[in-house]
Image (cartoon, rainbow, N blue to C red):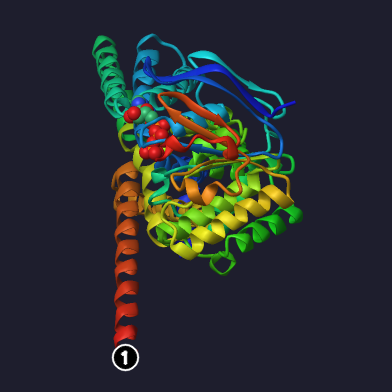
Amino acid sequence: MTICFQEIFQYTFMQRAIIVGLFVSLCSALLGVPLVLKQYSMIGDGLSHVGFGALAVATALNLTPLPVAIVVVTVSAFILLRISEKAKVKADSLIALISTVSLAIGVVAVSMSSGMNMDINNYLFGSILALDKTDVYLAVVLGIVVIFTFFFLYHQVFSVTFDESFAKATGANVTVVNLIISIATALTIVIGMRIVGTLLMTSMIIFPALTSMRLCKSFKNVIICSSIVSLCGFLSGILISFFFDTPTGASIVLVNLAIFISFYLIKAVMIRIRLVKYKENK
Amino acid sequence: MSLVKCVDAAFAYEGKIIISDLNFEIERGEYLCIVGDNGSGKTTLMKGLLGLIKPVQGEVIFEGVKAKNKNRGIGYLPQQSDAQKDFPASVYEVVLSGAVNDLKFGMFYDNATRKRAEEALNKVKMLNLKNACYRELSGGQKQRVLLARAIMASKTMLLLDEPVSGLDVLSTREMYRLIEDLNKNEKMTIVMISHDVKAALPSATHILHIKDKQAFYGKPDSISRNIWN
Ligand SMILES: Nc1ncnc2c1ncn2[C@@H]1O[C@H](COP(=O)(O)OP(=O)(O)OP(=O)(O)O)[C@@H](O)[C@H]1O
Ligand SMILES: [Mg+2]
């Protein structure tokens, strides 16, 4: 086992991927819970597609992709949040439109700048080889900022997530909390996209939250459980991809699926045990 | 100085006027009971009083309470909260969230607040289910938890939108007693929407009857018989 880890840490790219990945998984687990509970999962999906468009256009224009993506995605986070607040019913369709349009813009940008196919593929499906030193620094700094902000705002996030109009009526600053959540989401997505790719980023946000919501009965436990699930999912995923030579992003998603299914089964078994006990007592 | 005042206020959804010609004020320590048929705009008015929606005409003037501030001291029990159907939260977490504006440094609840949460739970007789999962409670139990949350938030004013819907006979009586107690002994200003006028009448200091417009506003003893006959 130790030999195994030594082997992995010999490679700089693996060191980088693991550091960046751990921060990204923690951030997306934390943010995923309020996003899923507020039924804002589509925003996450929309943002990662916008991120792809931004990266593709930036590459085509010979700009540094990451800063451009951060700015564009953050601005889009404002817009998507506004749409979800204003047009509750049509929000889903509007966000789907924005996603696909961004994807289309990205694809056109790619086709106009030939020879970039390699990069685009990395953006779509992620590549741990593509991470450089700046990515690592950025991920660490942003990760720490997001995690601290989340814990700082923990109770406010709970009230706003649980009942927005109540929070507003009692005078809490709902708009600010929502904004911070979406900016944090935007940053997490842009960094996470480098590892798991645009198309798979959403699952990093949704899976841990959904998985832990099945079993946990308090918000605090959901947050803790979802963080653990996310970190374990990422680590197992990246190890599997290293040893079996499978694509990293897809491996992480599939591990997350496996964890989700196991939680589902655990819950089913728990219910069965309870019923059996009840019948025995009778 | 009144807490909240409506001057010729009218509320609308998407340009369609729901209620208009509202003229009344809520003084500190009052117990206002709002009555009216289904769809007459009671909930809409309450949202206006909370500042969640703006009047399309006239004004809602916040005098004794702040219009928008973290220390408004207003508690609110919504009519229906279907938003949190599948929300994993413990009863205690929900009740504490009522005191979100008392957070120290915006970060944590101090011991006094935690103690208040237990007292609020005790008041609504839910202390034994403190650690239960909110989504697994019955409708009536949820209603009590949300009342405890509203109590946590209210320092000056408590707005209740049909607080007894879904409660059994005994709990209904206890709920009215609890509200009356808050009003009399803790000098809490109460605004309550109720269909059960007869039960609310003895303790209310003012009645507001709405029917498209403000049909009646005044003390319960001066009430005209024809409102509910
Ligand atoms: N979000 C909304 N958008 C458009 N119309 C609305 C909205 N909410 C309420 N209405 C309309 O406004 C009117 C008043 O609704 P409101 O909920 O205030 O009634 P209410 O007096 O509280 O009724 P109830 O006794 O059933 O609770 C209704 O005709 C309703 O259709
Ligand atoms: Mg109503």
Judged left or right of residue A203, residue B127 is right
- Image quadrant holding the C terminus of chain A, namely bottom left
Q: Relative to residue A130, is residue B91 depicted above or below? A: below
- Crowding around mark 1 (Cα neighbors within 10 Å: few <14, some 14 to 19, many 20+) is few
Q: How many marks?
A: 1
Relative side of B46 to A153, left or right? left
Q: Is residue B206 left or right of residue A98?
A: right
Depth order, front residue of A7/B94: B94
**Quadrant hosting residue A268:** bottom left
Res A155 visible = yes
Which residue is labeled 1 in the image? A282
Mark 1 falls on what kind of element? loop
Residue B98 picture location, percent across and down: 61, 46
The N terminus of chain A lies in which quarter of the figure?
Answer: bottom left
Q: Is residue A70 above or below residue B82?
A: above
Provide residue B40's location: percent of width, then percent of height: 39, 30
Residue B73 in the image, given as x and y percentages of width and height: 68, 38
Q: Residue at x 44, y 51 (%)?
A: A230
Residues B133 and A34: in front is: B133
Residue A79: horizontal and vertical position, in percent?
43, 19
In this view, the residue in front, B146 or A167, is B146
Inspect this view and state whether residue B90 appears: no
Near-viewer residue (A120 or B115): B115
Amino acid carrying label 1: it is Lys
For image coordinates 36% across by 48% down, the residue present is: A207
Q: Quadrant of ligand 2?
A: top left
